Amino acid sequence: MKSIYGQCPYATTQRVLQGKWAIVILFQLSTGTKRFNELERNIPEVTRTMLTRQLRQLEDDKLIVRKVYAEVPPRVEYSLSEMGEKFRKVLDQIELFGFEYIEELRKCNA
């Protein structure tokens, strides 16, 4: 079966955001550059291994930039790439939908 990644905008976006924590990490970085430990603190449910894996994938997908400083100990910072910055509009819409959906859930459970 032929892959539609790189041809269909929905399949391409789904593939890029396939990780469980991708959207949450992108949101965290949308508020500014972060170091690994900051991301780990801000997303307490994620394991170190999963965070590392997800950051590498987002970097490979060109949504984030990893900057390593030549210091001892080494300092590494993560930020949104130019393409990642374009995703901010999507994050805003996800937030709006999320709040509306949470409100709907509350109504149903009341």
Image (spheres, grey):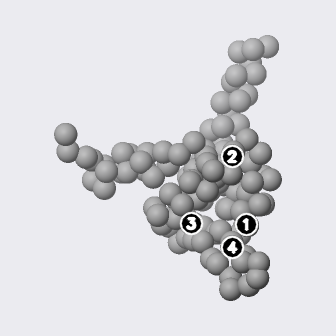
> Which quadrant of the structure image shows residue 81?
bottom right
Look at 66% across and 43% down and name the residue there: 96
Residues marked 2 and 4 touching at CB (< 8 Å): no
Outermost residue on the front side: it is: 72
Decide: is 98 above or below 72.
above
Residue at mark 4 = 76
Measure how far apart labels 4 and 1 are at the Cα level.
Answer: 9 Å
Looking at the image, is mark 3 or mark 2 earlier in the sequence? 2
Which residue bears the numbered disc 1? 34
Tell me the distance, in whole angstroms, between the alpha carbons under discs 3 and 1: 11 Å
Name the quarter where the C terminus is drawn: top right
Helix, strand, or loop for circle 2?
loop
Q: Amino acid at mark 4?
A: Val
The answer to whether residue 89 is seen in the rendering is: no
At label 2, which amino acid type do we have? Thr
**Crowdedness near tag 4: few (<14), some (14–19) or many (≥20) residues, C-alpha within 10 Å:** some
Residue occupied by mark 2: 47
Task: Residue type at mark 3: give it.
Answer: Ile
